[in-house]
């Protein structure tokens, strides 16, 4: 495998070359691309921007822009040829931590697309997917087509380790504050930072524009957020897929730490996953060799805390300060870690599409519209 993948020096050179090429060059927003008429079928649609992906869909679009402007409009219907309501998502290279946009990371959009597409095919038979297969779209394509779902309004969070986290809704923060009950699970007193939990814990979190909240399954049911039958299905299928991914990662020398998945109900009444699956942004992967050597060092008293090498957005969070964006040097370091991660994860050389982002988005939109829409 070592001969096939990019070396550390090659990764550094690739990132530097990319940043030199795109530095100072403006990238069109998804809305600007639609407004230009480059995709005639989508001209006149209003895009709903998101942290990671922009969305194009039929029906009401309502959101508050960063400048405080309220956008409230109605898009024309967007259906496939067989009448299925769907949406188009355009993955961006943006990265956010603590709900603050920190800037763009070279190749991040393509890397997460490759990561997600591999994982959804690995576990799709167990947890389903809203994503539509579109002939002609590459695995690295930043444009995605997915069926519109009735969202099940909570994040399904599964944890195998007590990962150190600054997120207020995390198990780690609860434990460090003295809590010994988290989402209905009793926590033992001897847990350590980044240590293994006694079993994989389902720790759901509500979705809110104001404040997410970690709740037990019973509390979700009591509040009417989900039915007992729906939650059982989501939990059981997710635990099976968690085990499948854990085994896959173990064979790659990685530890599967935790993940979050969102679900929705499709037009056939079936609960399926939506959005990202087991990516370096939605999950934590640790280097097993590093973790095991640190365990030995911890037992010998040579270190006071486990801090294994991570292939996840957690690496980027370490650069976050207040509301500041990342420097070019930090963006480059994060990009290199993402490239290392996808190569370690899949065991293949990372070969990015070097066309401009605008060209990649336009080609992706043309492919989706040409294959799915009259």
Image (spheres, helix red, strand yellow):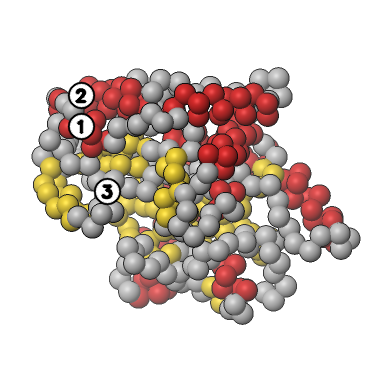
Q: Which residue is mark 2?
A: 38
Q: Position of residue 30 (x, y in %)?
A: 27, 35
Q: If you read the primary sequence from the N terminus, does the residue marked by circle 1 or circle 3 appear first?
A: 1
Location of residue 160 (image quadrant): bottom right
SS at mark 1?
helix
Q: Residue at x 45, y 64 (%)?
A: 204
- Mark 3 surroundings: few (<14), some (14-19) or many (≥20) residues within 10 A: many
Label 1 CA crowd tier, 10 Å (few <14, some 14–19, many 20+): many
Badge 1 vs badge 2, beta-carbon distance below 8 Å: yes
Q: Which quadrant, please, contains the N terminus?
A: top right
Q: How far is the residue under mark 2 from the one under mark 3?
A: 28 Å
Q: Position of residue 301 (x, y in %)?
A: 86, 63
The image quadrant of residue 330 is: top right
The residue at the far right in this view is: 300
Q: Which mark is residue 149?
A: 3
What residue appears at the point 39 percent right and 44 percent down from the top-left corner?
52
Residue 115 sits above or below residue 322 on the image:
above
- Specify whether residue 128 is in view: no
In x, y percent, where is residue 47? Answer: 22, 42
Closest to the observer: 87 or 309?
309
Tell me if I can see residue 313 in this picture. Answer: yes
Residue at x 38% of width, y 32% of height: 142
Residue mark closest to the camera, 1 vs 3: 1
Count of numbered circles on the image: 3
Residue under pointer 1: 34
Q: In the rendered image of this protein, does residue 168 appear above or below residue 236?
A: below
Q: Is residue 179 left or right of residue 61?
A: right
Q: Secondary structure at mark 2?
A: loop
Q: Which secondary structure, mark 3?
A: loop
The answer to whether residue 5 is above or below residue 105 is: above
The CA span between labels 1 and 3 is: 24 Å
Q: Earlier in the sequence, mark 2 or mark 3?
A: 2
């Amino acid at each position: 495998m070592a001969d096939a993948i990019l070396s550390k020096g090659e990764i550094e050179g690739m990132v530097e070359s990319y940043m030199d090429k795109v530095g100072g060059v403006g990238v069109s927003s998804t809305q600007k691309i639609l407004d230009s008429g480059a995709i005639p079928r989508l001209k006149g649609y209003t895009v709903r921007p998101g942290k990671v992906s922009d969305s194009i869909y039929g029906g009401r679009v309502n959101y508050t822009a960063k400048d405080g402007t309220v956008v409230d409009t109605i898009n024309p219907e967007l259906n496939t040829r067989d009448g299925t309501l769907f949406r188009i998502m355009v993955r961006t290279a943006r990265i956010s931590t603590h709900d603050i946009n920190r800037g763009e990371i070279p190749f991040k959009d393509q890397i997460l697309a490759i990561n997600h597409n591999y994982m959804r095919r690995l576990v799709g038979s167990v947890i389903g997917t809203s994503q539509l297969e579109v002939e002609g779209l590459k695995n690295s394509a930043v444009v995605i087509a997915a069926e519109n779902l009735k969202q099940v309004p909570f994040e399904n969070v599964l944890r195998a380790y007590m990962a150190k986290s600054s997120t207020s809704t995390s198990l780690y923060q609860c434990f460090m504050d003295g809590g010994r009950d988290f989402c209905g699970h009793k926590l033992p007193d001897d847990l350590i930072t980044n240590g293994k939990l006694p079993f994989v814990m389902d720790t759901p979190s509500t979705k809110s524009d104001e404040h997410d909240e970690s709740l037990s399954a019973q509390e979700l049911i009591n509040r009417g957020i989900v039915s007992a039958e729906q939650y059982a299905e989501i939990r059981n299928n997710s635990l099976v897929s968690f085990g499948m991914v854990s085994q896959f990662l173990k064979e790659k020398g990685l530890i599967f730490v935790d993940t979050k998945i969102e679900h929705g109900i499709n037009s056939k009444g079936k609960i399926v996953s939506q959005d990202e699956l087991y990516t370096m942004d939605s999950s934590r992967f640790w280097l097993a060799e590093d973790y095991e050597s640190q365990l030995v060092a911890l037992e010998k008293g040579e270190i006071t805390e486990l801090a294994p090498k991570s292939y996840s957005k957690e690496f980027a969070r370490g650069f976050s300060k207040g509301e500041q964006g990342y420097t070019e040097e930090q963006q480059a370091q994060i990009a290199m870690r993402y490239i290392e991660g996808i190569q370690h994860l899949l065991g293949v050389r990372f070969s990015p599409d070097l066309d401009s982002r605008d060209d990649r988005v336009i080609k992706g939109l043309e492919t989706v519209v040409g294959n799915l829409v009259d």
